[in-house]
Amino acid sequence: MSENKNVATVDVAKKYKKKSQTADIVKRLFRNKSAVLGMIIFLCIIVIALSADFLFDYEQDVIKQDIMNRLQGPSSEHWFGTDEMGRDIFARVLYGAKYSLKIGFSASIVSLAIGLVIGAVAGYYGGWIDMVVMRIMDVLLAIPGTLLAIAIVASLGSSVNNLIIAMSVSGIPGFARIVRSSVLTVKDNEYIEAARAIGATDRTIIFGHVLPNGMAPLIVQATLRVASVILSTAGLSFLGLGVPAPHPEWGALLTNARSYIRDYSYMCLFPGLAIMTTILSLNLFGDGLRDALDPKQK
Amino acid sequence: MSEVLLDVKGLKKYFTTKRGLLHAVDDVTFTIEKGKTLGVVGESGCGKSTTGRAILRLHEPTGGQVLFEGQDVAKLNATELRHKRKEMQIIFQDPFSSLNPRKTVSQTIEEPLKLHKLIPDKQKRLEKVLETMETVGLAERYINTYPHELDGGRRQRIGIARALALDPKFIVCDEPVSALDVSIQAQILNLMNEIQEQRGLTYMFITHDLSVVNHFSDDIAVMYLGKLIEKAPSEVLFANPVHPYTQALLSAIPLPKLGARKERILLKGEITSPINPAPVCRFANRCQYATDRCRSEEPQLKEIETGHFVSCFLCE
Amino acid sequence: MSDKKYAVEVNDLVVEFKTDEGIVHALNGMDLKVENGKTLGLVGETGAGKTTTALSILRLIPSPPGKIVGGQIKLAGEDLFSKTEDEMRKIRGKAVSMIFQDPMTSLNPVLTVEEQIAEVIELHEDINHAGAIQKAKEMLELVGIPGERGTEFPHQFSGGMKQRVVIAIALACNPTLLIADEPTTALDVTIQAQVLDMMRGLRDKYGTSMIMITHDLGIVAEICDTVAIVYGGRVVEYGTLEDVYNNTRHPYTEGLFNSLPNLDDRAAKLKPIRGLMPDPTNLPEGCTFCDRCDYATEICKTVKPKRVYRNEEHYVECHLYDEESVKTGGKIGK
């Protein structure tokens, strides 16, 4: 093992660079036009949400009432018009994006993390652990998600954080089930047995072999879950259980506008459009991601 | 007499199913000498793969002893077992599902070294990976490729390299060439032969292909529905098969020669269920020589000549 | 030579598949013919084009990505490519039927086996349901399964029995040509022996012509009359069993035989064919086998070998031979 040889091995490893699997996936994703469209729209929405603070002042533009200018139609001064308190709807929709995305992302990530652990343990160990854990998940699933969230928010009080908790809890069973079924599929492969044969521990097997191969449906589910959380939050706010007034959450904006729908329909139109565009873009992106991650397409 | 490496005594593996206890491996006893190859043949469901996996404790044996160099593998605790795995390895049948699709060739081969912290130095480990790749005939340019970029033969070489990386003494080869094309199959068989000669490895070679097992093994064990029914040195078994099932099995091999067709023994009758089997001969239903005794009593494995074991009432 | 009747003739068939990696040249001038009542063995490795040939005869090449670029297929003298899709439907299952490799997945799990056999009969024959079921039971008896088991579902059958059911379906309408794609690969040796025995019996009884797709030269020796060795989407050697087994000419055929373990001589070392099949998206300019051939010369790399006949039937595509040397030949390498 001379020094020369050492140098040689480094060269070999460098010379034959590995082809990135992520690059492959991205390439396939970009081939799908509707996925790219979804991604672009969603990126724009994120940028808008992040820049809301720089564009408008929360106290002045978003929640401050200005009765003089109430219920004005869209104009060059108020692009989306103003509401019954004279607040600029454009500013409120923009700030609404911030709330909606925050709740959507946080709730999805929390459910993903908890569901991942629960599903992986249940799927990998099987037997009575699987039985007990999955029956608990079934019970959670048997309660309609919105109803569960309503119950949680009703008992904890309505605030953004409680909303996130409610949405996270109702998302866990879905993730747990997906993780469990993909663990079960991957677990049957001989390379899992091979890993055990070379002396790998359960932890290495789960995190090194099982999960990396079962991630694809999970990533897709997470994307779609963001969309459904945004929708549910809007629904809850619509029922008066979401983000409390005067904060501008999209669902709350819609509830507000409901009473004026006959004469001032633009008040409903813009928050509605915002919700629709976001959900549509996420779903397009999620579907494209599913196709890109599916190895069968190779 | 050379040294016995593996001594399997009364190995049992039962699976609980909805319909009862499935006797996958039932009271199997054999030895493998150091540096030799034992071929295990039989049809699907005869328990040959389960036997291999029970020896390595990839399936927990239900009963019996597996003495590896005199030490009972079946009694090791989890940590001891992990260490023992350095000495006993396995090569799998399916070159597609036996490799993690998200690991490159070098990641797959170095994983066992990392797990056992054998070569802590990254540089030296890479050297070992390259050395192993060379042994199995994988060009170094494949070091960072993923399995899906390679063909079946090369993937199988990765599987062999992974097993060899720990320098084991004993390898269970579970149908390592069945999924490969004829010309590639011969390449892999030759490779495994060379490695055995170089390293003095001991193989347990599980297959359903009788011509391959004849070429490859020193001894052959024939299994039928969880039972070992005949074991003999390869020449003896092919020249003088005693058990009626072995005879039928050998006569069924299609020979790639003209005019070579032998008188074929066609088996009739239904295969006995391996779930809660009665203590009788399990082949009796399909056996042309079966007597009342075969249907009421279970034959035991007997040595009829040196090294030739048969479990049949016919040879008593 | 010309008064022989052929069940099927494939002439110079070229099939391509478009994929992301480029155009896969699956068949590059495939030629084969099966005489009425005879059996042809189609031998080759994975990706040689065996199954593509079979699917072309049924006109079942998925398109896209597949495309028949050129050539001709004649079924009992009639041009297959001029048929309409309606006419093809009548041919499939009736004149030509196919047995697939995996008996486990080619049966419908929710229908009883007799219903599955009766379905084919009803599609192609003017017969009522009761009559079709009756005939289905007869077919089951024919393949060695008691007729009363017809009311059972596929999962109640063993692998060998399922393959018998598949064969019963294939033979139900008394086809003139039966294509069997590795029919026994998924079966155990003793079961394989039973199934082959049965197929041979039925073929002889009904005078069915057959194409047996396999990689097992042992099976070919047992059941076929002629054999075509396929490599890189072309037939590289064709002849009667006698021609190909005892007067082997092509180096690839020789390589296949040498790769097989010899049952009579355990000590004999295997002589594998070195290297791998060429990439079908990028086939060599000359002989497709030249990269792996021990006898390859300069000409092999650039010029496609012409067909040389040893006798009326037996031909080989290899630069090693000319009209004269192919006859004397003896062993390869002169």
Image (cartoon, coloured by chain):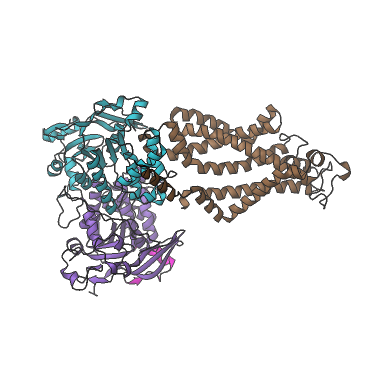
Residue C11 vs residue C82, the one in the foreground: C11
Q: Residue at x 48, y 32 (%)?
A: A122
| Residue A69 appearing in the image | yes
- The percent position of residue B240, horizontal first and vertical second, equals 12, 42
Residue B197, image quadrant: top left
Chain A shown in which color? brown
- Is B131 on the left or on the right of A85, as rendered? left
- Residue toward you, C200 or A179: A179
Visual hue assigned to chain C: purple
Label total for image: 0
Q: Residue at x 28, y 29 (%)?
A: B12
Please, which residue is most extreme toward the bottom here? C2
Q: From this viewpoint, which residue is outermost toward the right?
A: A68
Q: What quarter of the picture does the N terminus of chain C occupy?
A: bottom left
Can residue B94 be seen?
no
Q: Position of residue A30 (x, y in %)?
A: 56, 54
Depth order, front residue of B263/A283: A283
Residue B315 image offset from top left, x and y in percent = 11, 35
Hey, which quadrant is residue C307 in on the image? bottom left
> Magenta stretch?
C75-94
Q: Which chain is cyan?
A: B
Residue at 83% from the left image edge and 39% from the top image edge: A64
Residue at 17% across / 70% down in the picture? C327
Figure quadrant of the C terminus of chain C: bottom left
In this rendering, the answer to whether C177 lies above or below B309 is below
Where C113 sits versus B28, above or below? below
Image position, residue B205 (x, y; %): 25, 40
